[in-house]
Image: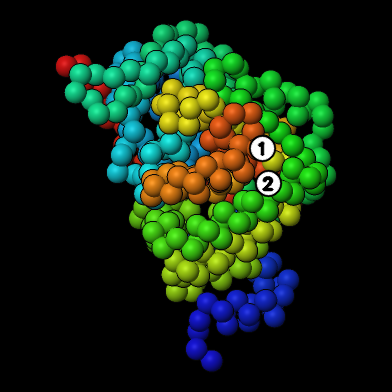
Amino acid sequence: MPVTRRNLITVLTLVGGGAVAATGAAVGVGAERAGMIHPDMSPFEAWRALARARAGDPLSIVAAGILAANPHNTQPWIFEVGADRIRLRADEGRNLGSFDPFRREMWLGLGCAVENMVQAGPALGFDVTVDLAAEAGEAMPHVALGLTPRAPEGRAILATMAERRSNRTPYETRPIPAELAGRLTALARGDGARLKLFEAGGDPGRRSGQATIDATRAINADPQMSLDSHHWYRATPREVSRFRSGLSVPTSGLSPLVTFAGQLLPPPGPKAQGDYWLASTSKQMAGSAVFGTIAVDDLYDRGQQLAAGRLWQRLQLALTVAGLASQPVNQLPERVDRARQQGRISEAEHAAAIVDEFGDGHVTFAFRAGYAEAAAPHSARRRLAEVARPLSEG
């Protein structure tokens, strides 16, 4: 029998639970790493390095920033580092193409990095201020972060940042406590980004889940979106080590057995990857406790995009402390952007009406949260030297 992705998974499935146990043992890792085949663990070093970050060193603030959430793990940032300030710029080349034609999600990711840096500041000996700025001749603004020295206090937030990750496995369907939902809602700070939470099992939750599945199916049917998604998929450990970015088999929310098999077989093409994604999305929508949306008044205002990203990062940190998992499910807003890019205004308005029904304003971000049934690994991160450079004083 020829070795193909389908028949090897079938054979491993027939082996059963013993293969799962052997898989975890073969790579010498705990439950979080079960199924991973990564002889080179350096792409994950950034998650451990923050614990060793030195107070008073501006690069330590960047070490916190690079652990932030970002779209499809593109890591679309450049940090220009000086003694008392950091410029955060969008790395335009690290975009999602037709998924993000207006760079809305790119700037959400920058907002996540900003929030991590601000929250890490006191632990690392700085108060951090934030301004959206532009220089003469700049086509796009940048984020200016001011660093004021202070006495370091409280490093617990650094451990939370190192623990945070997206978890794409199924969640338990039991609702989260009302008290926790109230604390999460209070994280919206009146800066233009607004949060709405609703139970996945209620009528809005069921309709939101189905709309997300339908949007995923539409994305797969769009050849360019399918290709742009596949561009950021790392099918093998070698690709993870080479690129240190993108989504990978271990971070896809599959079982340890299928994760193990998926890293051994020939990489899937865009269509096969899309089919897996649709099947996973259907399971995720059925296996969730809470859905949430972040809305703004203007989807394409850079300041509001930053505010929305900062709110998403605050939410993830709070969920991590509470022992809950979370995952972006942003297919609906992505379809709105794609239809607008192509000039299909009526389709864009229809899609926007669907997604905005679940938010307070124009929804720029959607997610799910709950108690995960399984641990999830961290995604790869680029080295600090790849994303940080000295600040030019000119």
- Colour mode? rainbow
| Residue 167 drawn at (x, y percent) | 62, 47
Decide if residue 240 is on the left or right side of residue 1.
Answer: left
Which residue shows up at 62% across the image and 64% down it? 279
Decide if residue 342 is on the left or right side of residue 379.
Answer: left
| Residue 38 drawn at (x, y percent) | 48, 59
Which residue shows up at 74% across the image and 42% down it? 204
Which residue shows up at 43% across the image and 31% down it? 300
Q: Which residue is mark 2?
A: 208
Residue occupying the far front of the picture: 346
Q: Quadrant of the C terminus?
A: top left
- When asked about the image quadrant of residue 20, the answer is bottom right
* Residue 61 versus residue 331 in the image, above or below: above
| Residue 317 drawn at (x, y percent) | 61, 30
| Residue 246 drawn at (x, y percent) | 44, 51
Which residue shows up at 52% across the image and 15% down it? 122
Please report contact status of discs 2 and 1: CB closer than 8 Å, yes or no.
yes
Q: Which residue is mark 1?
A: 358
Q: SS for tag 2?
A: helix
- When asked about the image quadrant of residue 66, the answer is top left
Residue occupying the far left of the picture: 394
